[in-house]
Amino acid sequence: MASPSNGRILVVDDEPLIREMAREILESSGYDVAEAVDGQAGLDAFLESGGRFDLVILDLVMPRLHGFQVMDRIIHASPRTRILISSGFSPDTRPELTRATPTTGFLAKPYRSKDLLDQVRRLLAAEG
C-alpha cells in the first residue's frame, strides 16, 4: 500500500539524468513527482495542472524558456507557489540568484540527496 504523498513536486530540467535522480530521491521520501524536459514544458505542465504543485524545482539554463522566465510566470499565475532554482551557477557569479524569498530557494548542482530533501522540506514548511 502506498503511503500518502508529502506533496506534489514538478522537476523541470533538460538533463534526463538529473530529472531521474531527483525523481528517485523525492519519490523515496514520499513525494508525488512530475517531470518536464524544458522550461516551456514545465510552464505548460504547471498551468495545465491548475497550479496544483506544492513546489517547482527549476534548472536555470534550459531550451525554450529560461528558469527565471518560468519562475516569473509561475509566480504571476500562482504567487504562493514554492520554487527551488537548481543550477551549476553560483550566486557569486550570478547575483540574481540571491533574490530568494521565504518561498524560493537555490540549490547548487551537483547536490547530495540530503541537500535536496533539506531544501524541499524547508520550502514546503515556509510561511508565504
Image (cartoon, rainbow, N blue to C red):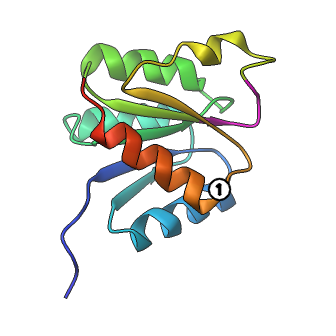
Q: Position of residue 60 (x, y in %)?
A: 64, 29
Most foreground residue, 116 or 14:
116
| Circle 1 Cα neighbour tier, 10 Å, few/some/many (<14 / 14–19 / ≥20) | some
Specify whether residue 88 is painted magenta. Answer: yes
Q: Secondary structure at mark 1?
A: helix
Furthest residue toward bottom:
1
Residue in the picture at 31% in, 42% down: 124
46 displayed left or right of 14: left
- Total tally of numbered discs in the picture: 1
For residue 38: magenta?
Answer: no
User: With 95 as the anchor, is 1 left or right in this view?
Assistant: left
Under mark 1, the amino acid is Ile
Q: Identify whether 111 is placed above or below 67.
A: below
Question: Where residue 44 sits: x, y (%)?
Answer: 37, 34
Q: In the picture provided, is 15 more to the left or to the right than 65? A: right
Name the dominant secondary structure of the magenta segment. loop
Q: Residue at x 23, y 41 (%)?
A: 49
Determine which residue is flagged by label 1: 18
Q: Is residue 65 above or below residue 11?
A: above
Quadrant for the N terminus in the image: bottom left
Q: Residue at point 44% right, 62% down?
A: 26
Magenta-highlighted residues? 86-90
In the rendered image, residue 80, in percent from the top left (x then y), is placed at 25, 24
Residue 89 at what x, y percent from top left? 76, 29
Along the line of sight, the residue nearer the viewer: 32 or 95: 95
Name the quadrant containing residue 34. Answer: bottom left
